Image: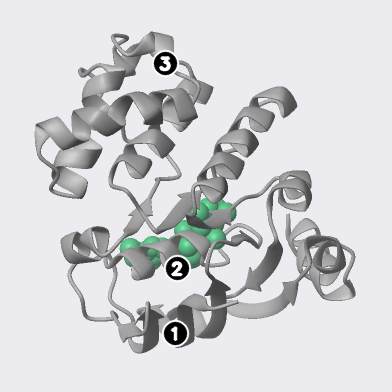
Amino acid sequence: MDEILRVENLSIAFGHNRVLNDLSFEVFENEVLGIIGPNGAGKTVLLNVLTGILKPDSGRIVYKGKDIAKTKIALRTRMGIGRTFQVPRSFEGMSVYENIMVGGVYGRLLSEKEAGAGADEILEHIGMAGRRGEIAGALGLLDRKRLEIGVALASKPDLLLIDEAAGGLTESEIANILEIVRGAKQKGVTVIWIEHVLQTMLEGTDRTLCIAEGRNVICGPPRMVMDSPEVHAVYLGTEEDE
Ligand SMILES: Nc1ncnc2c1ncn2[C@@H]1O[C@H](COP(=O)(O)OP(=O)(O)OP(=O)(O)O)[C@@H](O)[C@H]1O
Ligand SMILES: [Mg+2]
């Protein structure tokens, strides 16, 4: 399998707080890579570095063979890197359909016609086909999270980064998200999926990477990673701290 992304020795510090520490891993084309790690492990910071919101102090981000560590955010989106946010950021006053359009028109610079042509398929994909006119601000949590993924999909990503889509959802609601991620993979999208709910990672991902203190603790098949002494030590450590 070819790799779509390779992260090499990525480091970033905020003052004395070294959040990513020589982090290295790769993502293969069309896989779903799950990333787990305790609170504060650096997962969201990693996504922010991958999308260009934050600049790393050192290290390389090789995407489709090019080092994009210094590439601007908007260009990375147009190169096919899409993301969701841990706290959904839909435009509250706009309808579900308008939000999807914004993803295509502003995320990927599609014409309104092109974005509109893809919108129905995305609404279908996220299970909101009959709800295009609903106002985003009035949606419940599951729908906001689905819409958030839909907006990211509207920018036609080759690599989709999902930051905690399952947080706050029930088991059956998480199954909805799982279906959406599976659907994205079927369409050829590569996914990096950050999550706290470990069970989701077993069912929904091809490989799991555990990070702690900004380091690669272990990466491999989900069950192997989940059952590993390394991961148990990382999560036990946080329980003892709390
Ligand atoms: N912009 C920033 N400026 C300064 N410190 C930051 C910034 N963003 C994150 N941090 C710090 O980086 C560390 C890692 O935060 P991050 O949000 O990546 O954790 P996380 O793994 O996503 O945790 P969670 O599971 O709670 O979402 C934390 O100590 C946080 O305070
Ligand atoms: Mg986070």
Few, some or many C-alpha atoms within 10 Å of disc 2 (few <14, some 14-19, many ≥20)?
many
User: In 3D space, how far apart are the residues under numbered discs 2 and 3 (Cα atoms)?
Assistant: 33 Å
> Is 107 left, or right, of 40 in this rendering?
left
Mark sitting on residue 129:
3
Question: Is 61 placed above or below 237 here?
Answer: below
Residue 201, placed above or below residue 112: below
Q: Secondary structure at mark 1?
A: strand
Task: Report the amino acid beneath label 1.
Answer: Leu
Q: Nearer the viewer, residue 173 or 189?
A: 189
Residue found at x 66% / y 69%: 209
Q: Is residue 88 visible?
A: no
Which one is in front in this view, the residue at disc 2 or the one at disc 3?
3
Label 2 CB less than 8 angstroms from ligand 1:
yes
Q: Which of the 4 quarters of the picture holds residue 216?
A: bottom right
Is disc 3 surrounded by few (<14), some (14 to 19) or many (20+) residues within 10 Å?
Answer: some
Q: What secondary structure is found at the residue carrying circle 2?
A: helix
Q: Which SS class for mark 3? A: helix
Residue at the disc numbered 1: 10
In the image, what residue type sits under mark 3? Ala
Which residue corresponds to the image point at 21% horizontal and 23% vertical from the top-left? 98
Judge: label 3 CB < 8 Å from ligand 2. Answer: no
Distance of label 1 from label 3 (alpha carbons): 40 Å
Position of the N terminus by quadrant: bottom right
Q: Residue at x 56, y 72 (%)?
A: 28
The quarter holding residue 92 reads top left
Q: Nearer the viewer, mark 1 or mark 3?
A: 3
Q: Are marks 2 and 1 in contact (CB under 8 Å)?
A: yes
**Residue located at (20% from left, 35% from top):** 115
The location of residue 19, given as percent across then percent down, is: 48, 75
Q: Disc 2 designates what residue?
A: 46
